Amino acid sequence: FILFSRFNALQFILCEDFQFHSRSIIKNISTMADGGAEQPEYLKQSSQLGNTNRPQVAILDFGSQYSHIIARRVREMHVYCELYSCLVTAEELGKHDLTAVILSGGPNSVYEEGAPHVAQEVWDLIKDRSVPVLGICYGMQELAHVFGGKVAPGLKREYGKATVSRIPGCDSPLFAGLPEEFMMWMSHGDKLHEVPKGFKRVAGTSNADFVAIENLESKMWGLQFHPEVTHSPLGRNVLKNFVVEIAKAKQDWVMTDYANEFIEEVRAKVGPTGNVIGAVSGGVDSTVAAVLMTRAIGDRFHAVLVDNGCLRKDEATKVLKRMRDDCGVNLRCVDAKDRFLGLLKGVTDPEKKRKIIGGTFIDIFQEEAKKIEAESGKCDYLLQGTLYPDVIESISYKGPSATIKTHHNVGGLPATMKLKLIEPLRELFKDE
């Protein structure tokens, strides 16, 4: 298995985003090699964050490769945001305190049959709450299509840097502080030929007359270019003008506050006597999650590190020192080198290796969980190092022919363990 030449098996299953790597493993161990018997259901998680209390910018994803970058740019302003499929229902979106809505780009043409569109009920929700809207690329074309403009193919596709020129005398709040001309990144084949009623032209290029439009009364803006990418030098200024100046979003998304809030929340959830178990690899995600949990409930958090014999030299020793001795995490290391290597001996098929590694890890984790419960009492909770990109992967718009997942497996731990998930990093990007 080529990956093993650079990465150890434990990291492949558990490293950083444990459940992401294990999806392919779990698909294979659902029918094990010993006769193909069906295995029990696995613990599952919701694909939505469920954070209904914090005001947020909602980003509706139309399948753009840049959608997650929009979310990153908003978070960099210390503003909380979440990403949804463009097919999100008004019922789901309406649960949240919406500061603004951003419509992402996408590969489709708005006028084609089967192209994705925002539900009318969502537009009604936006109107009723008077929520500001920014459409980017396909998102602008969606605005135009819905409100009566004309979108059609351009004479030529436009991909790359383009000089955007503001309309003389047009003082749009979206471009406050920007020069009359500035460079932005374009990536489109279709373009706007007629603006919808109530909208006006704000900026254009040599290839397209309508690369920025606005409707001040409806609080709607559209951009043909991509302000979120690094190739648009002043793009962050444009996004900040919309998010902070126009939408008045609070810049209170601070990681220190987030950590303290989590610690208080987990204490309330687990209670004064509850126990939490979690698998760790020593990587960034599992270490941060483990330290946060330790600060919350101390030694009632039980971390398990499995040494499968494929780790780097002295890695298990270093992880133990860093997490147990330096960070104070209640960590036990299971020496399973002989067990893993004995089962892997002579096996060359990658699929079989995945089944062996995944199945053996689950067996060992369950064995350790039983030992911990015998020593310390019942464990009701599982610490999981899920990151926000894992959540995005499960909710992003994949196109009409693709199934949009509503959940994904959490490390393949059997549902019979009856563990409730605690995911302190679930709302965070890795650098956060």
Image (spheres, rainbow, N blue to C red):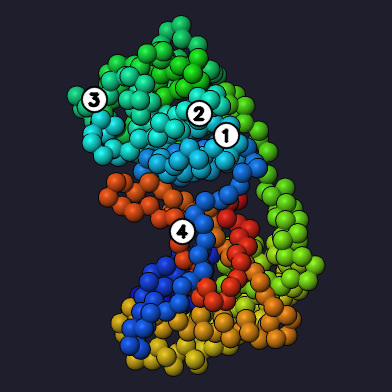
Whether residues under marks 1 and 2 lie with C-beta atoms below 8 angstroms apart, the answer is yes
Please say if the residues under marks 4 and 2 sit with CB atoms less than 8 Å apart. no
Residue kind at label 2, given as amino acid type: Ile
Q: In the drawing, does residue 334 fall left or right of residue 4?
A: right
Q: What residue is rendered at 58% in x and 39% in y?
A: 96
Q: Nearer the viewer, mark 2 or mark 3?
A: 2
Where residue 334 appears, as percent x and y from the top left, is 60, 85
SS class, disc 4: loop
Q: Are marks 4 and 1 in contact (CB under 8 Å)?
A: no
- Residue kind at label 4, given as amino acid type: His
Q: Among all residues in the image, which is located at the extreme left?
A: 155
In the image, residue 135 above or below residue 330: above
- Res. 26 in view: yes
Q: Is residue 153 left or right of residue 282?
A: left
N-terminal-most mark, 1 or 2: 1
Q: Are marks 3 and 1 in contact (CB under 8 Å)?
A: no
- Would residue 66 be visible to someone looking at this image? no
Q: Which residue is mark 4?
A: 407
Q: Residues within 10 Å of mark 4 (few under 14, many from 20)?
A: some
Query: N-terminal of the two: label 4 or label 1?
Result: 1
Upstream in sequence: badge 4 or badge 3: 3
Q: Which residue is mark 1?
A: 98
Measure the C-alpha gap from mark 3 to mark 1.
31 Å
Around disc 1, counting alpha carbons within 10 Å, would you say few (fewer than 14), some (14 to 19), or many (20 or more)?
many
Q: Which residue is mark 2?
A: 126
Task: From the top left corner, tell me how far across and down residue 160 is, in percent.
Answer: 32, 33
Q: Relative to 373, is 156 above or below?
A: above
Q: Residue sitting at 71 percent across and 72 percent down?
A: 275
Residue under label 3: 152
Earlier-in-chain disc, 4 versus 2? 2
Mark-to-mark CA distance, 4 and 1? 24 Å
